[in-house]
Image (cartoon, grey):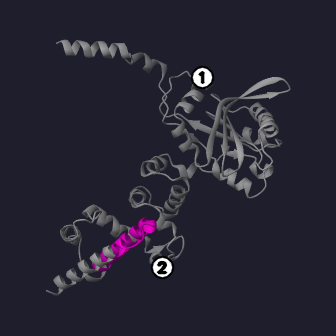
Amino acid sequence: MNELKQYGNLLNDIKNRIRHAQAKAVFSANAEMIQMYFDIGKMILEKQQNEGWGSAVIPQLAKDIRNELPEQKGFSERNIGYMIRFAREYSINPILQQPVAKLPDNHLLWKVPWGHHALLMEKIKDQSIRIWYMEQTIQNGWSRDILGLMIKSNAHHRQGKLVSNFEVTLPKPQSDLATQSLKDPYIFDFLTLTEPFQERELETELVKHLEKFLIELGAGFAFMGRQYPLTVSDKDFYLDLLFYHVKLRSFVIIELKKVEFKPEYAGKMNFYCSAVDDSLKHDTDQPTIGLILCQTKNKIFAEYALRDIHKPIGISDYELTCTLPETFKSCLPSVEEIEAELSRENNK
C-alpha cells in the first residue's frame, strides 16, 4: 500500500512538472523541455536507486501519463528510458564538474534538441566528444540526420587536422579560427564517380551537390563560383572553386587535385591568393586563404612546401567512398536496357 502511495506521489510530481514546463514561454521551449526530461529522469532514477524500483515502472508510467495527459507527447517507454539515462549520465557533468540541475538556463545541454541528445547517447560514449558535437550542432545548425552523418564520418577526429602555415601567416585569433574551420580529410561520400575520372569531373559533381558539399565544408562558407576568372597582367587564370567565409571574413580558394600533393601546388596557390587579395579583397577583409585538396599527401612534403610561403595555405586529403571501378561500370545496365526489360515484363 505504501509503495502504491509512493507511486501515486511520483506520478503526481511528474504531471506537475509537465504542466510547469507547458507554462514556459515559446522562446525557451526546447530548453525547458530538456530540463523537464532531465528532472523526470532524475525523479525516476532516485526511486530506482533509493527504493529499489525496477524497470517495470517505466511501462506503467508511460501508460498512466498517456491516460491522464493524452495531449502530451513524448512519453513512450523508449523515451522515458532515454530520460533516465540522460539524468544518470549528466547528473554530474565531467566537463564542468557541477550538477547539471544547477547549470544556467542558457547552458549548452539545454540548447541541443532532444532527438540529438538521444542520438549522442546511443553513438558516443565519451562525454567530452559529445560536448564537441553539441557545440558544432549549435554553431552549424545541424539537423539530427546531419549530426548522424557527422558522427559516422568521425568529424571530431578531422576538425583542425590539416597541414597549414596559418600560425606564421595569420595573426591570432584568426590563425586559430582558420585552423578550426578546416579539416582533414574531407569526406565526399555523397558523390559517385567512375574511375578514371578527371579533376574537372570532381569539381562539377561537387558543385552539382553544392548543399552537401557546403555541409561537409562546415559553417560559414558562401559559394562564389566555379572556374572563377582572374586576370593578371593580361593573362587569364581560373580558380577551381572560390568561397567567402563569413566567420573568417576572407576569401577561400579551393584547388582540387586528382593526384598526390606536389610541392609546386603550394607555389601556384600562393600566386592565386596574391591575385585575389589584389583584385577582390576589400580593405575590411582578412587575407585570402588557400585550401589544396588532394587524394593523398606526404605530410613532410606538405610541411616543407609551406615553410617559406607567405600566404595562408592549408593542405588536406579528400576521400570518395562511392567511387566505381571502370570494370564495374561496364556491368551496369543502361537506362535503355532497363526500360526494355520492363517493357518485356509488362507484355508477358
Q: Residue furthest right?
A: 233
| Residue 321, image x, y percentages | 49, 34
Amino acid type at circle 1 is Gln
Give yes or no for residue 44 being in the magenta stretch. yes
32, above or below 298, in the image: below
Q: Which residue is mark 2?
A: 102
| Residue 344, image x, y percentages | 23, 12
Q: Could you tell me how many numbered marks the image carries? A: 2
Give yes or no for residue 75 being in the magenta stretch. no
185, above or below 51, in the image: above
- The part of the chain drawn in magenta is 20-47
| Residue 46, image x, y percentages | 32, 79
State the residue at coordinates (28%, 63%).
73
265 displayed left or right of 99: right
292 displayed left or right of 211: right
Confirm whether residue 141 shows in the render: yes
| Residue 82, image x, y percentages | 34, 64
Distance from the alpha carbon under mark 2 to that under mark 1: 56 Å
Amino acid type at circle 2 is Lys
Q: Secondary structure at mark 1?
A: loop
State the residue at coordinates (53%, 30%).
208
Secondary structure mainly formed by the magenta segment: helix
Q: Residues within 10 Å of mark 1 (few under 14, many from 20)?
A: few
Q: Which residue is mark 1?
A: 198
Quadrant in which the N terminus is drawn: bottom left
Q: Nearer the viewer, residue 304 or 265?
A: 265
Confirm whether residue 52 shows in the render: no
State the residue at coordinates (48%, 19%).
326
Quadrant in which the C terminus is drawn: top left
Q: Residues within 10 Å of mark 2 (few under 14, many from 20)?
A: few
64, above or below 340, in the image: below
Q: Secondary structure at mark 2?
A: helix
